[in-house]
Structure formats: C-alpha cells, structure tokens
C-alpha cells in the first residue's frame, strides 16, 4: 500500500522552524513507498500470491481527455489486469469489481489488495485492476524520464485525467466482454480511495458503487481537520506505551542539544550509524518522524509495528541523557531491521513513483499536513500554505492550485451536499490510521455510509485476508461485502423492472 | 435563442445524395442564430428589456482546468452579469439563479431569457448570467481571430471546460457576496440546458438544482432517437396544414426537375430572387429546409411562424407545376420578409459564434441529425457518421470524439442510472420543438423530473413572459417555479437540521 504522506510530511517538517522546499533536487523530499522500502524486513502488508490467473493488457489511452488540441490526441499505453476465472458472464449481468490504482505500480497493488480476489468468487465477478497514469508501466511520452521531466509533461498527471482514464478503460472492458449491463463496483485505497469515491460521483453511469478505503478526501485546505495526521500518530503511540511516548517527546530536544555541541553532527551520525554525514539535526528528526508515522499508519498484525518500535524504545532503562538517543535509535532499528549503516534519506530517495507523486502533491493534492499544536509528541512545525505554494512554484515554474479539488470535487459541507445527491459509496476508515482524520466518518445517507473501526490501520480492510485476522476486521469486511451485494441486487431488480434487455 | 441545429442539418444535407464537408471555407455550413438573422422581421423571441440594473464583470478564467502544464495557466477574461436588486442577502442565505450561457453572446441571451428576471423578485434571488467561453466577449487568446483560428486554439472549447468555468465563477461570486450557503439554481436552454443538467450532476456541491430547458442531451450516437428532429418538423407542418405539407413534399422534385433543365439554375435563381448565382439545386433546398426547421423550432406567439409560412404557401391555388415553386418561395418570404433579393446562404454565413459552434459540433457535440426515413416531407439524406468524422478530420486535422459525451456524461440508460443517483433536475420540453426527440421526456425519480407540454417550442418556458402567453405556458412556468422553490425550502431546512451556521 503506498504511503500518501511521506512527501507531505517531509515537505512541511524538514526544517522544524521554517518550512522550505529546496531548489536543489537532492534535497527535495520524496514520496515513500512503505511496502517497497520495508518489504525486506517486517513487511506485513504484502504476500506472495498466485498471479497465474491474471491477464495483462495495455489500453491505448488519450493523454488529454479535456482538450481537443492536436497535442491532446497523443496516446500512451495504460496497463490493466483482468482475472476472469470466476466471472459468471454477460448473460446474467455478472458484476465487475474494479480496483482503481493510486500512486504506485500495479505490481505492488496486486500483492497487497485482497478485497477483489477474496470476494470475487462469491460475487462471480470479473476482477479488474487498473494502473494509474504516470505510475508503473503506464507511462506517457515513451519513458519515465520524459514523462517526469517537468511541468510540461507532468501537467497531464492529475486526478480528473486519471478518472477519465478509468472511465475509458472500463467502457472498453465492457465492450470487450460484450456486457452492457454488468454493474461495476470500484475499489480503491488512500488516494485511490478518493478516486473511487469521486469516480462514483462523477461517473455514476459507469460505476454503480464505490468502496473508498482510508480516503482522506476531506484533508484539504478548505476542510482542514481540527486534529491532524500527527495527532493520531501521537495518540496511538501514547496509548501503546506512555513511556515510549515520553521518551519520544524528550528525544527531539536531546537531538538538538547534541547537534549544537562541537562535532555534534558527527556524534549524532555515530549514534545513529548513518551511512553518510548529516546536514543537520533535521536529517535525524525527519527520519525518526517518518518511522513513527509509518509504524502507526501500517500498525497491524502479525507484526504490529508500533508495538515493536515502542517495545524496543522501552526495553532499556535510561542511565543518562544520551540513552534517550540509544532508545529512539533502537525503535528505528526495530522497524527497519539491523543494518551495517542507516540511510536517513531512505524514505525520501527519489523513485519514479515518488517523483510523480511529488508533482501531484505540489499541484492539486495539496494536503496541509504538519506538526500542529495538538501533536504533542513532535516539535511544532505547522503546515504553511504560503511557503508551500512558493516552494512548488519555484521548483516547477507553475503554482499549485490548492482550491481546485474543492472546486471540482467539493469537499466542504459534504453531508449537506450528498444527503440528497448520489448513492452507493462506502467510506471505510480505521480510527488508528492517522489519515482517518481526513476521512468521512459519519453516514451521509442510507447508501452513502461510513464504516469505521477503532483499531483499523491504513487500508487494512481491502488488504489480503489472512489467518489470524482479528474478529472486528473479518466482520468489517463482511459488512462491506453485504452492502455491495445489496447494491448489485437492487440494480438487477431495477434492470428487470425497467425491462432493460440484456 | 440560438439555433443548435443549423450546422448539423446543413452538414448532413447540403448535398442530398452524398454528404461531404467541403474544404473550401466559403462552402462550410455554418451555425445560424435565428434571433440574429431574423430579428428585423418577425422576431417574436426577444424584447427590449431594461438593463439598467445589470452590472457587467469580467473574471480572470483559467484556459485549461484539467492540465497543469505552463500553457494551461493562460487565462482569459470571461464575462458575467449580475442583477442584485432583488437579492435578500447572505444573512438569510437568499438563493442565486444562474443562467449558464450557451453558444451565443450574452447580449442576445439577456434580451431573450426571462426565467431569472420574471422569478427573481419572488425568490429574492441574486441573478447571474455567465457567458460561455469562446462566445461574445469571453474570448481566449486575446481576439476572436486568434481563438477561432485552428484546432490548437479551439481545442480548449468544450463542455467540460465550460462547466469548470461556471464552477469557478460561481464560487467566486459566492465569495464576493460573502454568502457561503446561498443555494444556486442553474438554468440553461438548448445546449445550455444540457450544460445546466450536467452541471448539477458534476458539481452538486455548487448547484443545488438545474432547470434544463429543451436540452437534447440524449441526441447522441449512442442514444439516437427513433424518430429524429425532422420527424417533428414534418409532423408540426402537417398538423398545421395538410395542404402545406403536400406542397412542400412535392416541391423538392420540382426543384430538381427545373434545375436539370438547360439554364435550370438560372431559372431557379430568378424564381427565388437569389442575390447570387446558384451552385446547385441544394442551395435552394437547404435554404428552404432551414426555413421550415426554424419556423417549427420557434413556432410561438404572437407570430406563430409555421402558421405564417403555411398560410403563404397555401394562399394561392396552383395553376401549373411551377406554382409549386412560387408557393414555397412565398413561404420563405413570409418568414424572412420582403427583400430585394434573397441570400440562400443567409443561415450559414460565418460569424464568430457559428465558427466556434462548428468546432464544438465537429469535436464532441456530434448529434446525428439528418433527413431520415420517417421524415416524409424531405428527400432522404440520413446522417452518416463515417463521412461526418472524415469531413471534420480533414477540415480540422483532428477527428471528433463522438463517444466522449457518453463517456463523460453518460447518455445511455439514463433512467436506470439516475433512478437512484442525483436529484433536483427539471428537464422541460415542448413536444412541438423538433429537439424534444432528444430530451428527457419521462420522470426519472421524485426530484429528477420531466415537464413536457404539447405545444411548446424550443426553450419557450425560459423565454420572457409576455401578455397573451397561453394558459398552458403560464402554468408550466409556475410548476417549474414551485419545484425550484421546494428544492430551496428543503435545502434551508437541511441547513437548519445540520446546524450549519450562516
């Protein structure tokens, strides 16, 4: 499951007193892909799954759906994958479950997403997975190098274009399988969850319903949550271990104190076994902050990362002040594993995915995430929209449009707006997921509903089922399944009532 | 009220045996603006209205809402007009009625559209009129000459961009008047009616409801109506006068017969007092076909164009065959008025508006209108999509995307799709309007409703109220008003129930 937050977090907190996005490419914070970065250690998020029933296709996709200039007629090959083994076919209008990719390669999604293959057989559904433009192998302009070069090529990477891609591919699939009236349920997680909900709202003629897992679609400038992402990070760690929380609280000042010594950065570098020299104490602080966020966001069985991290932090009683550093270092090691040295930039090293996501979060998906007043575990570093905009503008040459999401999708007064408009959306959130603060947590209408669980972590409900899943998770998934099943039944009844021929 | 049809009609019928879009600019069929072309004669559509309460503004609009390339940050000045004299203000969340412009200058709309000013005082509403991009004074690229030059500049002219323009301006107006929760009702006619309905569906967070007058939003390739535009033209004329209908039926062969004589075109030219020489009998036939279509589409009091035309055609009993031509000529004169000569291209002379609309109908608004089998009054010339696409492609260098409207907005199975999705749309149609064949004529749900009248002509319900309006029209408008009023009441109640502060 991709991490939405890394770039945002790092962008707002990389220097604790004043935020700035560096113009030097090497300093620009990157998107972290937890499942990629951490899979060699404790990765509890993905499994080896049988992919032999998957067929891979490429669709000739329009680069630009919304202008009709000669340039917009450029196309690219967009990857999608189909599993048709369980599908009951067009004759019975058997349903289609479609996973809408987010900011990652489809390969990693195929290993992590369980909802489709776990429920496909029961629904006799055709399973479809679509990769998001500019990620994985779905690269316009012939190569990632070209596509990710600058604003002129990246400019076509945004959510409205991605939704139109999904519309075109899903219609294409319906034609290919000669099934005019198979209902489509779209499923997505995190940013992909936003896309799923938005897709149902913008393309109701294509998707009958949406399961939007851990979609922080209210986490924008016009609907900043009262308590932010790091409030939950703090809360979960504190609830896991008050002692752990206290250690982390104190550690920042200790890092600053050591850094301020003569050769302070060298001492820190040795303490944290960094692979390279440090540029400042913020290198360590950002590294640790990401560890805690990542541990909380993906805190689930069998590993329970927060427990591991806090267990390590709490393990040795402090003898003198420096032990604070040993302890937080032990926490990091518990998550990342024993290494000969630790790269403090490991979460921010540029990959194609992170470069693409950096563009998205610097253009329209501008989420005002920072260390706010309520986030008592961290040193204060709130998100500053003005400097964020300036940073993006100076880096890309074009400013973000932080209000565009609100203009196009609407985020304010969602309950008022959708109470009498739209239907068939599940917003699922685990309240232990820091992103849940930006999610829809209350039912909006009879069929636009919120499913929340106390313990759930980011996108946990749509991840692969496994033995030992807690009871609440099994029940949550079953509830989601039942709701989707009821949408499909209602639709099949409507088809009959309206005498629509198959 | 602009004519949607002219370019489409002429494109499909300009040569009766085989359609071709000519590459020579002078031969390209144009959009006709009935209220412009005919206003000096019988124009019953517009009145002189008091515009002293209207304030004109220009909004700095993004050229491209859906890509974020440096080029898409170009802006243009988009015109909108506000009448605030009746508005009860932000404190009581008084409503906003917003007219969404179609393919014409706002100046002509302001003279023709009555629904806002006739109902604004009763609702204590703020009245807003917004001009469509690339029409009137809302021209990108600095000038009409630049904007309308070729596909590279015209490429930004389409319905999705236009809807996003309206979204941006309406949010801007709400901010300007500091009214966060004033409900907005959008109103449009013809193509503008499609935009109004689509706006409610795509931007429910901005518009509470829509009145879509005479919106043929089902008249696309994937939902071709069983009986087409000219079926109604024929039907209305036949119902007005069987004799008139018979004369017109016979006239086409007579025109062909005369044209085939030595000097036949010269004889026709003299018969029809044409201002210039004829290129073929189709010049006359297209001219007459447009007269009949126009007469039917705008057939309303006090003039009743169909009655005038048929009265003239029926007036003199025929003595010999040629009198057929005298009679259909008399019909044309009845509509256009006495002139020293008649320009058979009068409906197709290029104007900025018609050039812009030609692009729209050659890119996405591809309506398959032709003389079909059922349209017995005309010589057969059905719409041919293949040759239409080829014609547009060779003219603009880029092909139309005739399925895009279906992909983005959904036109198939509208009843199935919207039965449980969306709310607050009125589709109004007069069944004597040829475009009604492409309209929504049945209720879809409790709040997505069809209002149809036997006698109504194109967009008649939203035109200016006048003394002598027939009873059914008065009642239709009142019904529309009451429905809109109920949406607003329900919304005000929801605001209170949800404890949303003003």
Image (cartoon, coloured by chain):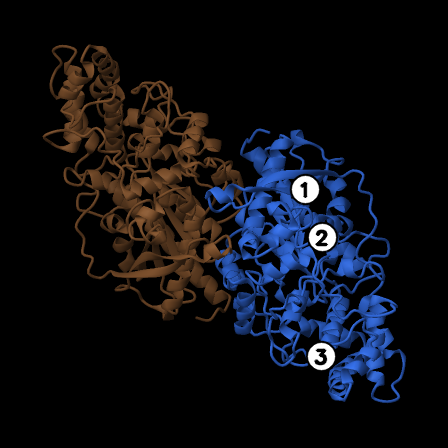
Chain colours: A brown, B blue
- Of residues A112 and A477, the one nearer the viewer is A112
Q: Is residue B490 above or below residue B416?
A: above
**Residue B110 visible in image:** yes
Q: Is residue A495 left or right of residue A305?
A: right
Q: Is residue A200 above or below residue A287?
A: below
Give whichever of discs 1 and 3 has the lower sequence position: 1
Residue B188 drawn at (x, y percent): 66, 52
Separation of disc 2 and disc 1 at Cα?
Answer: 28 Å
Chain of the residue where label 2 is placed in the rendered structure = B
- Of residues A428 and A479, the one nearer the viewer is A428
Residue A314 drawn at (x, y percent): 15, 21
Q: Which residue is mark 2?
A: B479
The 10 Å Cα crowd at callout 1, few under 14, some 14 to 19, many 20 or more, is: many
Disc 1 and disc 3 on one polypeptide chain: yes
Q: Do residues under tags 2 and 3 come within 8 Å of each other at their CB atoms?
A: no
Residue at image coords 76%, 82%? B265
Q: Secondary structure at mark 1?
A: strand
Give whichever of discs 2 and 1 has the lower sequence position: 1
């Amino acid at each position: 499951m991709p991490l939405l937050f890394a770039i945002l977090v790092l962008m707002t907190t990389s220097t604790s007193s004043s935020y700035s996005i560096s113009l030097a490419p090497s300093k620009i914070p990157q998107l972290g892909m937890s499942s990629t970065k951490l899979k060699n250690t404790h990765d509890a998020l993905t499994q080896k799954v049988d992919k032999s029933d998957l067929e891979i296709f490429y669709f000739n996709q329009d680069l630009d759906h919304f202008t009709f200039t000669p340039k917009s007629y450029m196309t690219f090959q967009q990857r999608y994958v189909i599993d048709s083994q369980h599908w009951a076919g067009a004759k019975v209008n058997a349903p289609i479950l479609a996973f809408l990719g987010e900011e990652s390669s489809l390969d990693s999604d195929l290993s992590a997403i369980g909802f489709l293959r776990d429920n496909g057989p029961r629904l006799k559904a055709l399973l479809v997975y679509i990769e998001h433009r500019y990620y994985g192998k779905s690269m316009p302009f012939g190569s990632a190098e070209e596509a990710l070069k600058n604003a002129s090529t990246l400019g076509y990477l945004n959510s409205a274009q991605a939704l139109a891609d999904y519309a075109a591919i899903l219609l294409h699939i319906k034609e290919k399988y000669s099934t005019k009236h198979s209902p489509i349920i779209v499923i997505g997680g995190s940013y992909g969850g936003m896309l799923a909900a938005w897709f149902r709202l913008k393309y109701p003629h294509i998707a009958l319903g949406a399961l939007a897992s851990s979609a922080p679609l209210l986490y924008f400038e016009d609907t900043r949550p009262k308590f932010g992402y790091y409030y939950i990070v703090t809360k979960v760690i504190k609830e896991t271990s008050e002692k752990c929380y206290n250690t982390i609280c104190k550690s920042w000042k200790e890092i600053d104190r050591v850094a301020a010594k003569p050769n302070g950065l060298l001492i820190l570098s040795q303490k944290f076994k960094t692979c390279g020299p440090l540029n400042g104490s913020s290198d360590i602080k950002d590294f640790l902050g990401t560890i805690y966020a990542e541990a909380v966001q993906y805190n689930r069985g069998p590993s329970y990362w927060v427990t591991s991290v806090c267990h390590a932090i709490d393990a040795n009683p402090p003898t003198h002040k420096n032990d604070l550093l040993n302890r937080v270092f032990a926490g990091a090691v518990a998550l990342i594993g024993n290494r000969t040295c630790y790269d403090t930039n490991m979460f921010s090293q540029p990959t194609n995915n992170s470069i693409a996501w950096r563009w998205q979060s610097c253009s329209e998906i501008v989420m005002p995430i920072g260390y706010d007043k309520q986030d008592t575990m961290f040193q204060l570093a709130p998100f500053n929209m003005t400097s964020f905009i300036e940073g993006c503008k100076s880096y890309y040459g074009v400013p973000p449009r932080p209000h565009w999401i609100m203009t196009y999708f609407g985020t304010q007064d969602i309950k008022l707006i959708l109470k009498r408009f739209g239907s068939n959306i599940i917003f699922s959130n685990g309240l232990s997921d820091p992103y849940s603060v930006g999610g829809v947590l209350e039912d909006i209408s009879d069929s636009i509903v919120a499913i929340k669980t106390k313990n759930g972590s980011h996108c946990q409900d749509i991840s692969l089922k496994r033995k030992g899943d807690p009871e609440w998770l099994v029940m949550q998934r079953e509830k989601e399944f039942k709701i989707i099943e009821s949408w499909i039944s209602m639709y099949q009844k409507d088809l009959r009532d309206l005498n629509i021929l198959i």
